[in-house]
Image: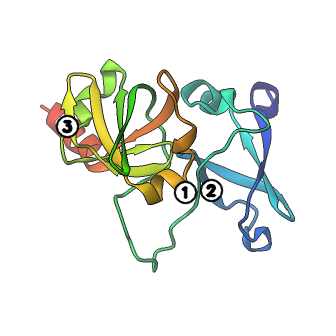
Amino acid sequence: IDQLEVGRRLTVATSYDTSEIVLGASIACNGACLTAVETTQGYFAVDVSGETLNKTTIGTWGIDSKINLERALKAADELGGHLVLGHVDAVGTVQRLEREGENHRVDIEVPDSLKHYVASKGSITVDGVSLTVNEVADRVFGVNIIPHTWGHTSFADLSSGAKVNLEVDVIARYVARLLERD
């Protein structure tokens, strides 16, 4: 089966200099690492597999959807945050959005399968943005979004009930796997 029969080709408008995007380059789109298969001035295209459509929010995107984009880190680049792989683990649901002074408080519910990977003061990636978890209550974790992040990401478009892509901390994932060993 041709992958495009079970997937989809998406064209993404961007302010990136697309002449610098090499075909085959990885670009995280709302946290999902996708491969650039075509570029034109101001746009790049990616092929999205059926698996990715089923495991992320990509299938819900429309013409006017705003998404967070991030180019792949080069080995010599500064690591200015948490380790993010672009491997979406699951889709979460925004439970509450509330303004707290200049910041925004966001509470997100994770699927039961991910709750053991989320820890207070640990990291989690929401729609491709790496954040610090404030606290966790069973399957719901809270984060605070500072004004800069709120204004430069798609978070301003969130509402209660919105679906978001989640990537748990890679170190937590490997620690959990090691603890499973006999």
Q: Is residue 182 above or below residue 112?
A: below
Q: Choose mark 2 or mark 3, whichever is in front.
A: 3
Q: Is residue 151 above or below residue 71?
A: above
Where does the N terminus fall, quadrant-wise? top right
User: What residue type is disc 3 on?
Assistant: Glu
Local SS, label 2: strand
Residue 43 in the image: x percent, y percent?
81, 57
Q: Are marks 3 and 1 in contact (CB under 8 Å)?
A: no
| Residue name at image x 51 percent, y 73 percent | 74
Near-viewer residue (177 or 96)? 96
Near-viewer residue (88 or 109)? 109
Left or right: where 120 falls relative to 100:
left
Report the Cα–Cα distance between label 3 and label 1: 24 Å
User: What residue type is disc 1 on?
Assistant: His
Estimate how packed mark 3 is, as few (under 14), some (14 to 19) or many (20 or more) residues with alpha carbons within 10 Å. Answer: some
| Residue name at image x 28 percent, y 41 percent | 173
Q: Disc 1 marks which residue?
A: 152
Marks 1 and 2, the one that precedes in the sequence? 2
Estimate how packed mark 2 is, as few (under 14), some (14 to 19) or many (20 or more) residues with alpha carbons within 10 Å. Answer: many
Report the Cα–Cα distance between label 2 and label 3: 30 Å
Q: Disc 3 marks which residue?
A: 135
